[in-house]
Image (spheres, coloured by chain):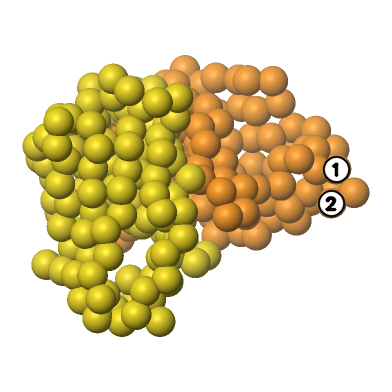
Chain colours: A orange, B yellow
Amino acid sequence: RKEVEQDPGPFNVPEGATVAFNCTYSNSASQSFFWYRQDCRKEPKLLMSVYSSGNEDGRFTAQLNRASQYISLLIRDSKLSDSATYLCVVGHNDMRFGAGTRLTVKP
Amino acid sequence: GAGVSQSPSNKVTEKGKDVELRCDPISGHTALYWYRQSLGQGLEFLIYFQGNSAPDKSGLPSDRFSAERTGGSVSTLTIQRTQQEDSAVYLCASSLAGTGAVYGYTFGSGTRLTVV
């Protein structure tokens, strides 16, 4: 079993849509959780941390369920510029990445 | 420096040759990490350094791979006798000590290695 598993995607949505990505992790001792964004042929960049109480940053909402070892990312009012691959990342002593979910937002 | 710097940005090498990839982390970042990303795949953890020590080498794919870090700064990832399956983007990231798993890492732009 992979340490971090994500929806395989791809997700193709129209502008303005709401889209949700899910992620599960296997290490119950994991202490930190993130969503990274990776554009084509670019390095990953931190999108947001994920806190136990859930957190929101503009159109982006992240949730964590420690009991189920599950993380989610919700994007509201999708923009063309949101098109990218979204990586779920789980940290213990280092960080382990999911394979990513590709999102394409279309006009 | 202002960001994580990796060199070369692109490297084409013949099968069987050795290559060295360099990472210069953000100034003051004592933790340094190497990942590998094959085409269309996720990031594969290779190794991380805390200072000059590598507590976790479990991700290195084979004994052809080695890494070192000197002076708590620059790190070199060496691949000996390269194989075609080594072709990938090699990404380096750094963080302040103890905070990588809290605040996340900053990545360099990677070295795209092609073994022909």
Where is residue A50 shown, x and y percent of the image? 47, 26
Vertical relation: A74 (above or below) B56: above
| Residue located 84% across and 51% down the image | A106
Q: Specify whether disc 2 shares its chain with disc 1.
A: yes
Estimate how packed mark 2 is, as few (under 14), some (14 to 19) or many (20 or more) residues with alpha carbons within 10 Å: some
Where is residue A34 shown, x and y percent of the image? 45, 32
Estimate how packed mark 1 is, as few (under 14), some (14 to 19) or many (20 or more) residues with alpha carbons within 10 Å: some
Instruction: Tell me, for residue A2, which label it has, or none.
Output: none
- Closer to the chain start, of discs 2 and 1, is 1
Instruction: Check contact, mark 2 vs mark 1: CB within 8 A.
Output: yes
The three-letter amino acid code for the residue at tag 1 is Glu
The chain carrying label 1 is: A
Decide if residue A79 is on the left or right side of residue A89: right
Q: Which residue is mark 1?
A: A15
**Which residue is nearer to you in this view: B12 or A89?**
B12
Instruction: Return the residue found at the far right.
Output: A107
Q: Which residue is mark 2?
A: A106
Figure label count: 2
**Residue A90 visible at all:** no
The three-letter amino acid code for the residue at tag 2 is Lys
Decide if residue B90 is on the left or right side of residue B81: right
